[in-house]
Amino acid sequence: MPYFVYILASKRNGTLYIGVTNDLARRISEHKAKLIPGFTRQYDVTLLVYFEAFESVLEARAREHTLKRWRRAWKLKLIEDLNPNWRDLSDELNTLAT
């Protein structure tokens, strides 16, 4: 089962959130529906702008921890290198699941 580290944004260059999950499509839908109280609901952080897949939860959590310690400029560069238009990648999750 793959594990995912993901970055959500409120808008281009907006508020960022980094999380980890084993079901990216479900987790993103929870964020978008604002089902979970907390940071993402409070700051309207719902755009999936970056994600990575890992084979183990330990690898995913280690990467999440690393990214959370990065400077903001490094996070923005990571996003822009892969997703320069800050598209919401959640539409592409359906193709991952199939």
Image (cartoon, grey):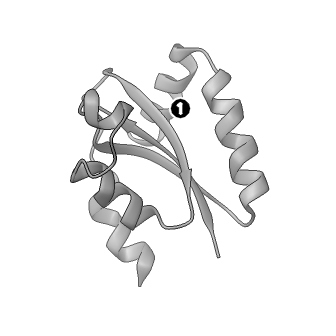
The residue sitting at 27% across, 52% down in the picture is 35
Q: Is residue 73 left or right of residue 25?
A: right
Residue 80: image quadrant is top left
Q: Residue 43 in the image: x percent, y percent?
A: 27, 27
Q: Residue 29 in the image: x percent, y percent?
A: 29, 60
Q: Visible in this render: residue 44?
A: yes
In this view, the residue farthest toward the bottom is 98
Residue type pointed to by label 1: Leu
The residue sitting at 62% across, 62% down in the picture is 3
Counting other residues with Cα less than 10 Å from the Cα at mark 1, is it few (<14), some (14-19), or many (20 or more)? Answer: some
Q: Residue 98 in the image: x percent, y percent?
A: 41, 85
Q: Residue 6 in the image: x percent, y percent?
A: 50, 47
Q: Visible in this render: residue 84?
A: no
Q: Is residue 97 left or right of residue 74?
A: left
The residue sitting at 33% across, 41% down in the picture is 37
Q: Is residue 49 left or right of residue 29?
A: right
Q: Is residue 65 above or below residue 87?
A: above
Q: Is residue 95 above or below residue 98?
A: above
Q: Nearer the viewer, residue 82 or 52?
A: 52
Circle 1 is placed at which residue position?
78
Residue 13: image quadrant is top left
Give the structural element (helix, strand or loop) at label 1.
helix
In this view, the residue farthest toward the front is 37
